[in-house]
Image: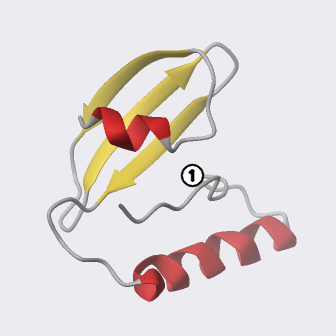
Amino acid sequence: MNEQWLEHLPLKDIKEISPVSGGDVNEAYRVETDTDTFFLLVRSNVDVKESFYAAEIAGLNEFERAGIPTAPKRVIASWRG
């Protein structure tokens, strides 16, 4: 886990960060705060184009508009360092 990633998350009071298995392309983490739980995807050591996650974000937005529950629910931040 890179501390620089955490600096760019719009989250307060992070209690725990745990690696999650199953990702083929990204590193995945469960991030727990005092108020909620989040799913963090990181593609480190690769120059990722802005459009890399565009289809995934669009799909999550469509599910939310249609009232279809998903996990994760929505994208809260995108950062390219």
Q: Amino acid at mark 1?
A: Pro
Q: Is residue 46 left or right of residue 74?
A: left
Asked whether 21 or 52 is in front, the reply is 52
Q: Residues within 10 Å of mark 1 (few under 14, many from 20)?
A: few
> Which residue corresponds to the image point at 51% horizontal and 22% vertical from the top-left?
32
> Which residue corresponds to the image point at 84% horizontal and 73% vertical from the top-left?
66
Secondary structure at badge 1 equals loop
Relative height, residue 60 to residue 31 (above, below)? below
Relative height, residue 21 to residue 63 (above, below)? above
> Which residue corresponds to the image point at 59% horizontal and 55% vertical from the top-left?
77
> Which residue corresponds to the image point at 30% horizontal and 77% vertical from the top-left?
48
User: Is the image coloured rainbow, by chain, by secondary structure, or in one colour?
Assistant: secondary structure
Q: Is residue 26 left or right of residue 29?
A: left
Q: Quadrant of the N terminus?
A: top left
The percent position of residue 13, horizontal first and vertical second, equals: 59, 15
- The tally of labels here is 1
Q: Could you say which quadrant of the image residue 25 lies in?
A: bottom left
Q: Could you say which quadrant of the image residue 23 lies in?
A: bottom left
State the residue position of label 1. 72
The percent position of residue 10, horizontal first and vertical second, equals: 63, 40
The percent position of residue 70, horizontal first and vertical second, equals: 63, 56
Asked whether 81 or 75 is in front, the reply is 81
The percent position of residue 26, horizontal first and vertical second, equals: 25, 61
Q: Is residue 69 left or right of residue 53?
A: right
Q: Quadrant of the C terminus?
A: bottom left
